[in-house]
Image (cartoon, coloured by chain):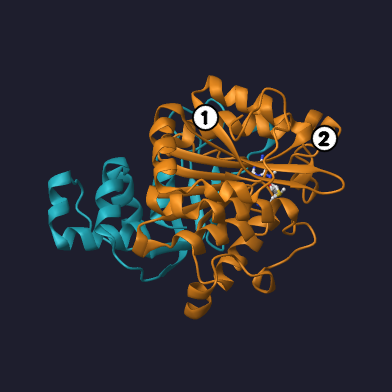
């Protein structure tokens, strides 16, 4: 267990737990973990204390984050929530198989936690149900809840955003997967109104969909972060990704 | 479920104003040793509702925590190690969290509290 911990910075597929009603890691999950890996040096420097994943599914992402950033000895603790009772069980098994720990809560987004944890979470990661579907599929039991996003796939996303804003600490970072159909530029505008800057960290296009992982952080800290990132040359990885300005009004890496 | 999590959970039923702390009824708990990180403990201390932590620890038979605590105590190694043990090393595996206002019971199974609400509670 110890050796697998030190050798791998992401969760291993062969150690994942599974259940027919739980979302298996897919392109979106991998894109999110790749985004976190790409930003890992910054994250380590950022020294988060509390991290949270909303909608942990198989546990692939939160397990990877814990492997990347370390645990108690580095002073980082993790929370993971899911609305699907099978998912939280699978996440628990996946974490255990990798020898890492997160506190798991079966709940809607962060209900029951958001009051006391307000302003305390330094990193939030979300791969939300983002697929445009009929409204009545949203929040259905089991695996349907893992993709069903209602109109423009925004139904759950739009409920998650204000909760994340409440949870994040002053230096908080928020990573979220979106689909072009979700109108990510409008999401960025919404978040800008709440005081967040944003940047696309990963973009992936498959035949059916175009995925983006967007990172959000509070504007005032943004300037300092930007300056530091440039100074340390840590933006260079950006060039690995085809960062076209694929939505209106977007030039370069911010949206 | 660590007592850290217990300290962060409150009843989420609509209209409940006094949903913290949830009363802990533990049936099964385990201890898992983890490395003590003093910086983490000092950083999180101001956010911890001490009475809730001490009460929850007592509910699972750990009574080394004082009834009240203030930041000056963080200089004591003994205090830190008790705080560490209560907050991070005690895991409730099976039990119930009870809302102090409504008596609503939230089960904890295999270490996972279930805060999902029924339709009429949202
Ligand atoms: C696209 S899946 C992602 C799963 C996993 N994080 C991954 O990346 O592979 C979305 C997850 O969000 C969960 N979910 C959907 N609506 C939710 C809600 N309101 N609160 C918490 N979790 C939710 C689903 O059950 C599902 O596990």
In the picture shown, does residue A200 fall above or below B94? above
Number of residues whose C-alpha sits closer than 10 Å to that of mark 2, classed few (under 14), some (14–19) or many (20 or more): many
- What residue is shown at x 61% (from left), y 47% (from top)? A239
Helix, strand or loop under label 1? strand
Of residues A200 and A189, the one nearer the viewer is A200
Q: Position of residue A52 (x, y in %)?
A: 51, 48
Please identify, in this view, whether the residue under mark 2 or under mark 1 is nearer the observer. 1
Labels 2, 1: one chain: yes
Residue B57 figure quarter: bottom left
Q: CA distance from mark 2 to mark 1?
A: 26 Å
- What residue is shown at x 67% (from left), y 68% (from top)? A16
Residue A8 is left or right of residue B61, and the answer is right
Residue B24 is left or right of residue A104, and the answer is left
Residue B77 is left or right of residue B83, and the answer is left
Of residues A17 and A39, the one nearer the viewer is A39
Which residue is tagged 1? Answer: A197
Number of residues whose C-alpha sits closer than 10 Å to that of mark 1, classed few (under 14), some (14–19) or many (20 or more): many
Q: Position of residue A142 (x, y in %)?
A: 77, 50
State which chain is coloured cyan.
B
Which residue is tagged 2? Answer: A132
| Quadrant that contains the C terminus of chain A | top right
- What residue is shown at x 27% (from left), y 41% (from top)? B46
Look at chain A in the picture and name its colour.
Answer: orange
Of residues A247 and A92, the one nearer the viewer is A247
Q: Position of residue A191 (x, y in %)?
A: 57, 26
Helix, strand or loop under label 2? loop
Of residues B97 and B83, the one nearer the viewer is B83
- To which chain does the residue with label 2 belong? A
Q: Is residue B100 visible?
A: no
């Amino acid at each position: 267990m110890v050796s697998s911990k030190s050798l791998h910075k992401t969760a291993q597929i062969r150690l994942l737990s599974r259940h027919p009603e739980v979302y298996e890691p897919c392109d979106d999950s991998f894109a999110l973990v790749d985004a976190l890996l790409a930003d890992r040096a910054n994250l380590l420097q950022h020294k988060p204390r509390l991290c949270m994943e909303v909608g942990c599914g198989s546990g692939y992402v939160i397990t990877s984050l814990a492997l990347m950033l370390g645990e108690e000895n580095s002073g980082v603790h993790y929370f993971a929530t899911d609305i699907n009772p099978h998912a939280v069980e699978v996440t628990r098994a996946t974490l255990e198989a990798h020898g890492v720990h997160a506190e798991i809560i079966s709940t809607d987004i962060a209900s029951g936690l958001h009051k006391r944890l307000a302003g305390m979470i330094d990193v939030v990661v979300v791969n939300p149900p983002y697929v445009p579907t009929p409204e009545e599929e949203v929040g259905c039991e089991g695996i349907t809840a893992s993709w069903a996003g209602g109109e423009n796939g925004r139904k759950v996303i739009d409920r998650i955003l204000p909760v994340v804003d409440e949870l994040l600490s002053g230096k908080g970072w928020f990573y979220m997967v979106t689909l072009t159909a979700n109108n990510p530029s409008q999401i960025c505008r919404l978040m800008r109104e709440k005081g967040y800057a944003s940047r696309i960290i990963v973009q992936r296009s498959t035949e059916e969909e175009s995925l983006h992982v967007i990172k959000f952080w509070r504007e005032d800290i943004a300037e300092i972060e930007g300056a530091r990132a440039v100074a340390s040359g840590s933006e260079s990885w950006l060039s690995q990704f085809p960062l076209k300005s694929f939505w209106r009004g977007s030039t370069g890496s911010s949206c | 479920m660590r007592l850290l999590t217990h300290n962060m959970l409150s009843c989420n039923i609509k209209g409940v104003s006094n949903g913290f702390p949830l009363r802990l009824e533990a049936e099964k708990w385990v201890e898992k040793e983890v490395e003590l990180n003093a910086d983490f403990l000092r950083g999180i201390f101001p956010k911890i509702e001490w009475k809730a932590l001490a009460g929850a620890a007592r509910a699972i038979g750990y009574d080394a925590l004082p009834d009240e605590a203030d930041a000056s105590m963080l200089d004591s190694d003994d205090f830190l190690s008790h705080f560490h043990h209560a907050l991070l090393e005690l895991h409730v595996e099976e039990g119930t969290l009870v809302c102090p206002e409504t008596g609503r019971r939230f089960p904890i199974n295999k270490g996972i509290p279930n805060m999902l609400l029924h339709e009429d509670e949202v």
